[in-house]
Amino acid sequence: MDELYILRLVEEKKYIQIKKILEEMNEVDIAEVMDELDLHNTLLIFRMLPKDLAVDVFAHFSVEQQRDIVNAITDKELEFILDELFFDDMIDLIEEMPANLVNKVLKDSTVEERKLINQFLKYPPDSAGSLMTIEYVELRKKMTVKEAMLHIKEIGLTKETVYTTYVTDMNRKLEGFISLRLLVVSPEDAIIEDLMEDDVIFVTTHDDQETVANVFIKYGFLALPVVDTEGRLTGIITVDDIMDVMEQEATEDFQRMAAIVPSEDPYMTTSVLNLAKQRIVWLLVLMIAATTSAYIIESYASVLSSVVILASFMPMLMNTGGSSGSQASTLIIRGLATGEIEMTDGFKILWKEFRVSLIVGITLSIVNFARLMLISHAGFAVSLTVSLTLIVTVAIAKMLGSMAPLLAKKLKLDPAIMAGPLITTFVDAITLTVYFSIATVLLNL
Amino acid sequence: MDELYILRLVEEKKYIQIKKILEEMNEVDIAEVMDELDLHNTLLIFRMLPKDLAVDVFAHFSVEQQRDIVNAITDKELEFILDELFFDDMIDLIEEMPANLVNKVLKDSTVEERKLINQFLKYPPDSAGSLMTIEYVELRKKMTVKEAMLHIKEIGLTKETVYTTYVTDMNRKLEGFISLRLLVVSPEDAIIEDLMEDDVIFVTTHDDQETVANVFIKYGFLALPVVDTEGRLTGIITVDDIMDVMEQEATEDFQRMAAIVPSEDPYMTTSVLNLAKQRIVWLLVLMIAATTSAYIIESYASVLSSVVILASFMPMLMNTGGSSGSQASTLIIRGLATGEIEMTDGFKILWKEFRVSLIVGITLSIVNFARLMLISHAGFAVSLTVSLTLIVTVAIAKMLGSMAPLLAKKLKLDPAIMAGPLITTFVDAITLTVYFSIATVLLNL
């Protein structure tokens, strides 16, 4: 349905028509349209929606809009929303609300509920615990398929997913899982224990969300159980939430690798000032770091002033070094993120990059030497200086570029910060030193 | 189960024990372990597995292993695998096989089947058509819930998913969809037509896989119907396949942005020669492109030789320009990939980047001016030259960096190629020109 058309209907106050259109739409699209409205109209239309749909739409609102609505609606309306919201969405809501609204949200919760909420609020931000929800279907192994199906029929609508159900014992210890598909195709009198898969793949509450995402990708699961340190089932993570994590983790890595302080806010709605702030920090760091290169050049000022043409190859050498380093670091950073590369692969990688860098460096160097001699007529000594520097630079850049992300990970930093810009700054200094040292020898300076 | 432990059992030929262990494992893990074995042992163990599990494991083998197995097994064994494989996995298999094996695969197929296979092979590689499979559950709107459930019970195990089922008319025209969850919780005599969602969100066979992935992320679906130009249901795409697409698309973008020719092969198993090939092309292009910078510096050789210290600030200016450009281009490339930024946003982005660049440029410039005056004692004129260049460079880099990906997209190129390395090369040339022009004026050269 056309967004502009609905917004015009709102202006014309054709509410009956709006209601009819919205009821046919997906909750994600409704939330998207309503994000364009002012609070008055949002509330008006929000209250017009069938209650269950209203809750689904609420879960997809922006943080700001959720805040405004929580602030504006009555306690009774809020109670209904909180009752119907999935637990993970409620936790997200509480985390984003200012203190006075948190009080409004928690007012009617029981001691038990508050305890659980507090437990969930304590999980580290990017952990499995912070992603999971408690609305899963629990079965017992002695149940028959018929009993299980009746149970699902009864509670199915209140669960985040019914397609994977979990078999637990009296102490909530995870014993197995079974898919709804298998339940549906199995005879009614079969026993869950005989059907269930007892080799359960699970994650623990403190696992990092990137690890969790890699498990989902590897096995193609729709949901994954989360257990605590004693092996008790404490929640599940569903694939839709993991897709968001994957997108967000990739975006963060892209930002870090481009020397931007990561932010979850979309580009188009981020203010100019905030965009500037995200970018200035690293640029300042890199600018200061480039001082090293300046000192190196200054200390070779006499070399430069006798052969000024040497300056003209500096950009090419520095860029080739920087790009060579970026290539290696990017592949390693990505490999670490997808779980393909492990910390123990360090030596294999170094040896691999050394050989790659020789092939790349020598090839570039030959092309460059021919070009300088035949087209630029730079003379033998200068051409050789530039070409030899190229080989050394590519080799150092690739080895440094591949090792830096592993080092960062070892130091519990995000490997993605060791990307292009930072590597380039290091490589620059090395390139210049190599360049002028070789020049001093070959050009007898 | 420990991989090394199983491999040792294989060496010790303890096949009964191996069989017992494997039967308990997830098919993905079995395939992973078997990828370590030689063909003899692979075949031996492959034939030991229960037939259905064997097919699931086969679908997860590497291309090389699939090829070897297809080559080695009997026609009868192959027929069983082909019958049980999901259609999308079969198409992938055919696409990867050499011609002689394709003939072996297609030998027993009917004319009808071949026609369908050919149709699927013709979809563009990154399109929805090439991702979809034909094993979906089709319902009719006049069915009761009971009839629908019986239908699913009968055919459920042969379908890629049963959790979303599709309602079509006699001409396979898509009329609606309904989730298995809703079927399970609804009364048996309810009619599908009254329950189904008739506002169906779908993709078409020629939609790009990145577009499809963004629909999945936005709505959190488990499956999405694919229709042809006449609105007829031709297949479905499931979320597990889309997670692979998301990871692969992000990896490709990371590679392109680091001036690497994209490849789906994992780093650790790619040969040194292939890694070198992926990297040389762009480095050569960038090296040649840097000739421009060399010419610019040469043409200002007299300026440089009179104030050699100017050379020492070149790395800092070029890196800051390059990083500033990367920051902008990365955000735009990522925004285009996730669908957050659209081609029509061009002017808004340019205006935004202009303002961001002023804040960033002026801030950097002030810090830099103070540093050069107070710490480096570079003198007023040189400090001013460097600082003014910084402002202009950052502004040009950010505007160029943000527009280049949009331009690439307009030219039907991948926006990701307009990342750091390429932008840096352009920005270098501009930076140097600005730098020496300002120097000529301010230093009276």
Image (cartoon, coloured by chain):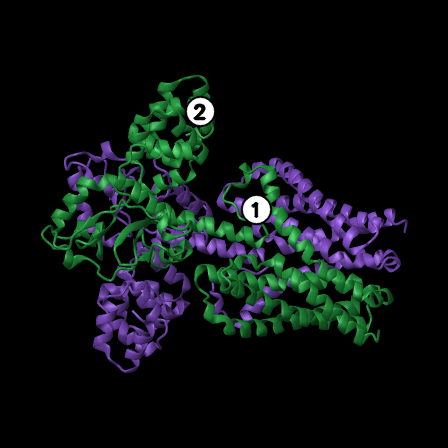
Chain colours: A green, B purple
Relative horizontal placement of residue B437, taking residue B118 as reference (left or right): right
Residue lying at the far front in this picture: please name it.
Answer: A111
Secondary structure category for the residue under label 1: helix
Q: Residue furthest right?
A: B444
The chain letter under disc 1 is B
Q: Residue shown at 58%/49% (left/top)?
A: A260
User: Based on the displayed image, in which of its 4 quarters is residue A141 positioned?
Assistant: bottom left
Q: In this view, does A276 lie to the left or right of B70?
A: right
Residue in front for this viewpoint, A415 or A161: A415
Question: What residue appears at the point 31 percent right and 79 percent down from the top-left corner?
Answer: B8
Residue depicted at x 54% and y 36% = A269
Distance from disc 2 to disc 1, alpha carbons, whole Å, reads 31 Å
In the picture, the quarter occupied by the N terminus of chain B is bottom left
Residue A124 in the image, given as x and y percentages of width and height: 40, 51
Quickly name the residue at label 2: A39
Judging depth in this view, the residue of B149 and A387 nearest the camera is A387
Residue B331 marker: 1
Three-letter residue code for mark 1? Leu
Report the amino acid beneath label 2: Leu
Q: Residues within 10 Å of mark 1 (few under 14, many from 20)?
A: many
Give percent across and percent down for residue A157: 24, 39
Dot 2 lies on which element?
helix
